[in-house]
């Protein structure tokens, strides 16, 4: 893989780096939920009781990036800044040694995700020692997030969004668009959690594997770009007065055939390390009795039945097909996103929305006879809608 680094773009690049997340909300929440299923019974009841909060809080690090200027570097490490030939041979794994060699400001600028994983793991261990349920949930969710970030190849390079190779938008395509579009085809069944003797070595191994996938990540996109015209490759959305471009579903379908196995593999591996680090923190804290932190202290009949159903679906790899992933649950929309169209469709007029009070599936009214008349009656100001011309 050859990459051209343009020096004049580096300043703007580093400012923009904080805008790219990993896995998107869907991926992070899926990873966290599956990690609960991989836990042993000594932890599973507690984690399942709080799974809703865990899944929701697993995206908190991304949610606070705009407000916390120190947050963005925690999600990545640009290994190719240090060397494109042998970055892992030149980068010390221990933070103190790395800071001594490259200076703390440099590490902060180009990402600190492996050391953040260690810091959050230590915080989780202390939360277990203190029997602090709130802190256990918080740090378990955040540990899941940062570990998940390390599994994304594009979180190990300066060219994190393909912006230096004219492939801008590749980040979102890889970690959001593909999983959301093809989750029914992915295998979410993983290995059971195991105690991790050397967590720092484990997370560095993940990062090195992610970095090894970069060549295919870029090159497979280039292969498709050579045969797919730009007006088919991209779609455009107009929102808040701005037009943005992203890869089309047609490109996503083609890219899935090229790299889908890689995305599936990384998504499948993340929950196993997450659950293993949860288990490790718990054991390092002296294996506190988590049932004592629950009220009631034992799983209810409903919880047991629900967990049994989900574990069965997980083992059969039908969680997504059975709509059992919390990330699949729809939330009430505050506003409707503007319609996304292909480049060819951008010039076509948008379809007229049905008037308020008329079902979307209802036939369009003819201008001459079908009108909507709204009358307000009563002291309470309630409205009644009357359709004339029926």
Image (cartoon, grey):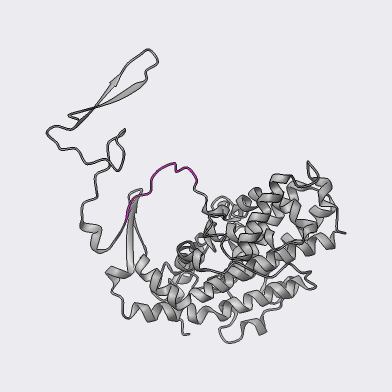
Q: Is residue 289 left or right of residue 14?
A: right
Q: Is residue 315 left or right of residue 256?
A: right
307, above or below 202, in the image: above
Q: Is residue 112 visible?
A: no
- In depth, the one of 78 and 270 nearer the eye is 270
Kindly identify the residue that appears in the image at 64 percent across and 49 percent down.
52
Kindly identify the residue that appears in the image at 43 percent across and 76 percent down.
257
Say whether residue 337 is magenta.
yes
Say whether residue 239 is magenta.
no
Question: The C terminus lies in which quarter of the figure?
Answer: top left
Kindly identify the residue that appears in the image at 52 percent across and 78 percent down.
214
305, above or below 370, in the image: below
Q: Is residue 338 visible?
A: yes
The magenta-colored residue range is 331-340
Task: In the displayed orientation, state which residue is furthest to the right.
Answer: 286
- In depth, the one of 353 and 187 nearer the eye is 187
Task: In the displayed orientation, state which residue is furthest to the top.
Answer: 379
Where is residue 337 shown, x and y percent of the image? Answer: 38, 49
Kindly identify the residue that appears in the image at 47 percent across and 67 percent down.
171
- In depth, the one of 74 and 149 nearer the eye is 149
- In depth, the one of 97 and 213 nearer the eye is 213
Locate residue 81: give its quadrant.
bottom right
Where is residue 155 shown, x and y percent of the image? Answer: 56, 70
Where is residue 87 shown, x and y percent of the image? Answer: 62, 82
75, above or below 84, in the image: above
Q: Main secondary structure of the magenta part?
A: loop
């Amino acid at each position: 893989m050859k990459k051209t680094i343009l020096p004049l773009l580096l300043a703007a690049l580093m400012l923009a780096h904080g805008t790219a997340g990993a896995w998107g909300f869907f991926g992070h929440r899926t990873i966290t939920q599956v990690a609960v299923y991989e836990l042993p019974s000594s932890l599973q009841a507690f984690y399942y009781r709080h799974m809703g909060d865990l899944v929701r809080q697993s995206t908190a690090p991304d949610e606070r990036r705009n407000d916390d200027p120190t947050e963005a570097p925690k999600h990545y490490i640009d290994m190719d800044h240090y060397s494109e030939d042998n970055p892992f041979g030149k980068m010390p794994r221990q933070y103190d040694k790395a800071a001594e060699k490259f200076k703390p400001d440099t590490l902060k600028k180009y990402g600190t995700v492996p050391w953040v994983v260690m810091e959050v793991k230590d915080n989780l261990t202390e939360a277990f020692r203190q029997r602090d349920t709130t802190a256990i949930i918080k740090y378990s969710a955040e540990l899941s997030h940062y570990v998940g970030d390390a599994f994304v190849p594009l979180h190990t390079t300066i060219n994190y969004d393909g912006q230096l190779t004219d492939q801008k938008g590749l980040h979102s395509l890889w970690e959001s668009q593909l999983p959301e579009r093809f989750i029914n085809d992915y295998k979410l069944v993983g290995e059971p959690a195991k105690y991790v003797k050397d967590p720092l070595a484990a997370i560095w191994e993940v990062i090195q594997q992610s970095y090894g996938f970069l060549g295919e990540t870029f090159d497979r996109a280039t292969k498709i770009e050579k045969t797919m015209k730009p007006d088919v490759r991209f779609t455009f959305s107009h929102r808040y007065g701005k037009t943005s471009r992203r890869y089309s579903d047609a490109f996503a379908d083609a890219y899935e055939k090229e790299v889908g196995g890689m995305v599936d593999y990384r998504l499948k591996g993340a929950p196993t390390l997450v659950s293993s680090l949860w288990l490790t923190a718990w054991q390092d804290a002296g294996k506190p009795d988590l049932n004592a932190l629950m009220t009631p202290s034992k799983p209810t009949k409903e919880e047991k039945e629900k967990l049994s159903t989900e574990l069965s679906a997980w083992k059969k790899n039908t969680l997504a097909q059975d709509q059992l992933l919390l990330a699949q649950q729809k939330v009430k929309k505050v506003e409707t996103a503007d319609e996304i169209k292909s480049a060819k469709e951008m010039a076509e007029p948008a379809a007229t929305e049905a008037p308020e009070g008329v079902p979307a599936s209802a036939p369009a009214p003819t201008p001459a006879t079908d009108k909507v008349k709204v009358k307000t009656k009563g002291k309470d100001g309630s409205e009644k809608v009357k359709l004339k011309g029926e």
